[in-house]
Amino acid sequence: MKKTLLATAIAGAMGLSAAAAQAATVYDQDGTRLDLNGRIAVGVSNTDADATKDSGSEFRDIYSRLSLSGSNQISQDLRAFGYVEWRFTGDERDTDSGFSEVRNSYIGVESQQFGTVMAGNFNSLYNSRVLTAFDYYIDRGSEVTGGGFNARGDSIAYLTPNLEGFQAFVAAKHYTQNDTALDGSKVRTQGGVSYDVAGLTLTAGWSEVEPLELSGNDSDKTRFGGTASYAFNDMVSARIGIDNQRDAFDGEGQEVYGLGTTVSLGELTFAADYFRVETPSGERNRNAYAAGAYYQVSSNMDTFVEINEADQRTEDTYVLAGARYFF
């Protein structure tokens, strides 16, 4: 990603770029800055959040959130930053806590010359840096490893500076016996590289699975994957990738192959993806499809329709329509 500020690149890596673009600056003086941002999103789906076959339609919240981001310029090249994000129920009254989840909360320092170190609760970099081309849909549709895998809490990461399009990262999550069923503390890592040149982006990386005592799987194999995406012009881009989920289904594992495209026509954007999911036994092989249409009503508001056919016998084709307001 070719951005002027590394902070902007970090926001994109964490999946925060949309909200960050609409952030309201609360304070900005003497190198210290505080931004408020978030979104309210509601919609209607043909099933409930658990996607059970006989659920019926539901008016629901689509991951509304509120966040605060701050930074302090330590020197000309060094900046300290912090970020916290909450999720709340946006479609109905909530008399319990107001917030349903602390989704992200982390601190760090960044340097254009030396890179970025961050620690705390943040999304999987394997998802947001390696598989990001397929992490497109607002609700569901992508079959690749999600942002919560081996992440979100007790984590530390290092990202190199952007070296003429090349960037690498490594992260580690600490699993402690103090609050889990582990016999001892354990560390699980993830890492990867990306290269961006003339509209072509190539990525590759890995992510270890969480300890067997927590995952319940019979396998401790490491996931690995990679993607290639190319922007033909400002309107059309295509993507292809693989995500080898060798620990899925109690250790049987599966390989996910993805192929997709995005077409932008001014305020209207279309996305479509095909996933082939294969298992060693062949009994769980399936073809999954996802498509979405997104219309930007204004700089702060968009509407959308998404369709997902996961080819699962227990689920109907999933349809979601809604709107989001960013602030």
Image (spheres, rainbow, N blue to C red):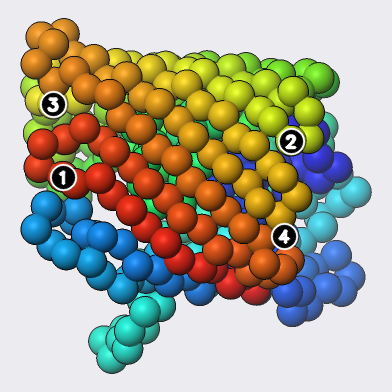
Find residue 163 and report its horizontal and vertical position in percent. Answer: 79, 22
Q: CA distance from mark 1 to mark 3?
A: 18 Å
Looking at marks 1 and 2 on the same chain, the residue that comes earlier in the sequence is marked by: 2
Looking at marks 4 and 1 on the same chain, the residue that comes earlier in the sequence is marked by: 4
Which type of secondary structure does the marked residue at label 4 adopt? helix
Which type of secondary structure does the marked residue at label 2 adopt? loop
Q: Amino acid at mark 4?
A: Ala
- Looking at the picture, tell me which residue is in the foreground, 196 or 200: 200
Q: Residues within 10 Å of mark 3 (few under 14, many from 20)?
A: some
- Relative vertical location of residue 49 with respect to residue 89 in this rendering, above or below: above
Find residue 84 and report its horizontal and vertical position in percent. Answer: 52, 64
* Residue assigned mark 4: 21
Q: Quadrant of residue 155?
A: top left
Q: Amino acid at mark 3?
A: Phe
Name which residue lies at 42% across and 22% down: 258
Horizontal arrangement in the rendering, residue 148 relative to residue 113 (left or right): left
Name which residue lies at 42% across and 61% down: 321
* Residue assigned mark 2: 235
Q: Residues within 10 Å of mark 4 (few under 14, many from 20)?
A: some
Find residue 173 and report its horizontal and vertical position in percent. Answer: 37, 37
Q: CA distance from mark 2 to mark 3?
A: 38 Å
- Quadrant where the C terminus sits is bottom right
Mark 4 or 2: the one toward you: 2
Q: CA distance from mark 1 to mark 2?
A: 34 Å
Looking at marks 4 and 2 on the same chain, the residue that comes earlier in the sequence is marked by: 4
Task: Decide if residue 322 is in sight here.
Answer: yes
Find residue 319 and report its horizontal and vertical position in percent. Answer: 33, 53
Q: Amino acid at mark 2?
A: Met
Task: Decide if residue 247 is in sight here.
Answer: no
Looking at marks 1 and 3 on the same chain, the residue that comes earlier in the sequence is marked by: 3
* Residue assigned mark 3: 249
Looking at marks 2 and 3 on the same chain, the residue that comes earlier in the sequence is marked by: 2
